[in-house]
Structures are given as C-alpha cells and as structure tokens.
Image (tube, helix red, strand yellow):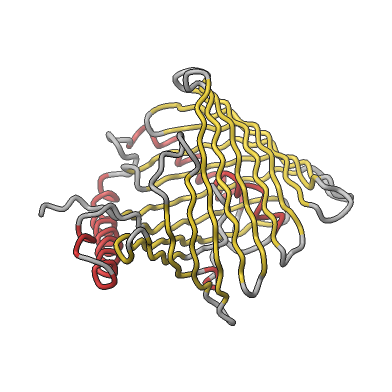
Amino acid sequence: MNKKCVVAWLCGVLCIQPVWAQGDSDLPLWLQERFEPVHYDLTRLVDDTARGLDQFFGTDDSLFVDNQSFLRIGLETRLRPGDSKLDPSVRFRVDLPTTRERMRLIIESDIEEPLGRLSEQGVREIRGGERFNTNNSAVGLEQRSAKDPTVQWVQGVGAGIKFGLPLDPYVRYTAARQWNLADKLWQINSVSRITQFNQRGFQARTNFDVSRKLDEDRFLRFQTYVEYDERRDSTVFSQTAEINRVLDSRTAMRYALIAVGDTTGSERIKDYIVQAFYRRDVHKNIVFVDVIPELHFPTLPGQDPYVALTFRVEAFFRGNFSRAF
C-alpha cells in the first residue's frame, strides 16, 4: 500500500468534510441513500436473530426486554517505517437475556478483547495476537448483578466454551465498581476479569482509571491496565495520562502519554508513546473515523524512535429496535 496515497486521502477527507457536512452526517447524500438501507437491514438482522434465539431458548419476554446484541465491523490501516498493513476487525455479541432466570446466554466473537478499547493501544503489539481470529469466539452463560456500581461492587460469574481445536471450556469472574468524589468532579472506575481456561490456563485482566472534569469540554484521565496470561507466563501492562477534549457534539480529541511494557526481558518498559487521537462521528452515531498519529520511543537496544499513523473506520449495528406492540 502506498503510504503517500493513504496520507493524502486522509487529508482530503478531513479538509473536504465541512463542505459536504449535513446535520448529523458528513457523508454525501448519494452515499447516505445507499448506506442506510444496508445498515437498516443488518441492524434488523442482528436484532431479529438475537431475539429469535432468545425466544427459542427463553421466554416471550424476549420481544420486549433490553437486548445488548451488536455487530461492529472495522477496517484499520497502520503505517510505520518498513511496515504497513490493512487489518479488518469483526466483533459481535449475541445477548439472550431471558434464557435463564438471572442468567444470560452470550455468544461473542472475541473473548480475548482487552477490558476497554483504550487499553488496546500498544498492548496488542506487545503481547501479539491478530485482531480477527475465529478461534477466539465463544459461547457461554453469564450471571450479572443488577446493583448500582456507585453503591457497591457489581459482580458476575460465567462459564462457557471457547471455540477452536480442541474446544476450551472456561469459567469467569468479573467485578466492577465506581466511586464519585468531590461533588463528582473526580470519578474512579475499576473493572476486573479473571478467567480459567481448561487448555490455555489462567488469565487475569484489570483496568483502573481516574478521571476529572476540568471544564465543560475537557477531561483529565489516568488509566492503568494490567493483563496476566499463564500461557505466555508474563504480565503486560500500560499506563496512560491523557487529556480528552470534546470539540463539538460529534468530534473529540485525546492527547496522551503512554508507557507500555511486560515482565519478560531485562527492560520492563518496552515503549513510550506520545499520541493524538482524533475521533469523528461521520454518520448518525453509526459510522466513526479515527485518525491516530503517534511518536514511539522504544527502549529495546537497536530500535530508534519512529512515527506511526493509524486510520480506522468502524460501523456499528446495534439491536433494540423501537417496537410498536
């Protein structure tokens, strides 16, 4: 892929955006007219499939209850010296909330996805792994607490089977908590997940972040992400300090300093990253564009600082159609 062409195309998109922007979409009318029927059909398919399965295994309440099924399709281009690739990603979750009393049947495409997508930055490169791998799909049952996370810990337990050869049964425990301090100016969130696989062993992940509202449009945030995997026999971690800024109702920027590392080798910190993250809702809270320039300072011997650029387009297909019954 020609890097100059990609960069030129990105600049063109950002420059021409105000010219064709119309209301809640940056897409030209001819493209909206072609995309929206496809989006409607796929969203209806996601919703009908989930509710149909839920009704088969559960009760008729499946037609009315909240359903958190979704399909997310993405296409990402990452450019860095000597390397560039086009990386598709598919993430889906089929939620069957009425299958058992206080239990939910979950079918998901990526049981390995980190807690929170922000923690993905840098961690995936350190620990390896493809963005789309059918062997990461799983089916299982989850019991979720309906408690308020601002009052007490919200805990959940689950069990299921990870696909692939051989099949890999697992059990899982999750816990989440939120604290609001100083008249809600400071917010602390903690999310942890522990999974025991029969084949690949023990896996633990935790994400802890502290955020403060600076003004109406800016937020200060510190994130700590830690991931231990018995199969790799290592702990991967990242620490992020960032300022998030809302530019308008559909655009946001994030400026971040990130340290990423693991416990293998003599150098614990593998990379320092200076990052700007531009995110734009280009069409009705359905299609999003991310542009992420980064400056990397790897610590391993023989590696020089380098610049990387990531461009990502994502489309979301969510259920919960408005139903007139």
Q: Residue at x 46, y 62 (%)?
A: 90
Q: Is residue 161 above or below residue 208?
A: below
- 251 lies left or right of 31: right
Q: Residue at x 24, y 56 (%)?
A: 40
Q: Is residue 163 above or below residue 259?
A: below
Q: Nearer the viewer, residue 18 or 104?
A: 104
- 191 lies left or right of 229: left
- 232 lies left or right of 275: right
Q: Is residue 152 above or below residue 231?
A: above
Q: Nearer the viewer, residue 198 or 136?
A: 198
The quadrant of the image that shows the N terminus is bottom right
Residue 6 location (% of width, % of height) = 55, 50
Q: Nearer the viewer, residue 309 or 97?
A: 97
Q: Residue at x 71, y 47 (%)?
A: 237
Residue 221, image quadrant: top right
Residue 195 location (% of width, % of height) = 59, 61
Q: Residue at x 52, y 44 (%)?
A: 176
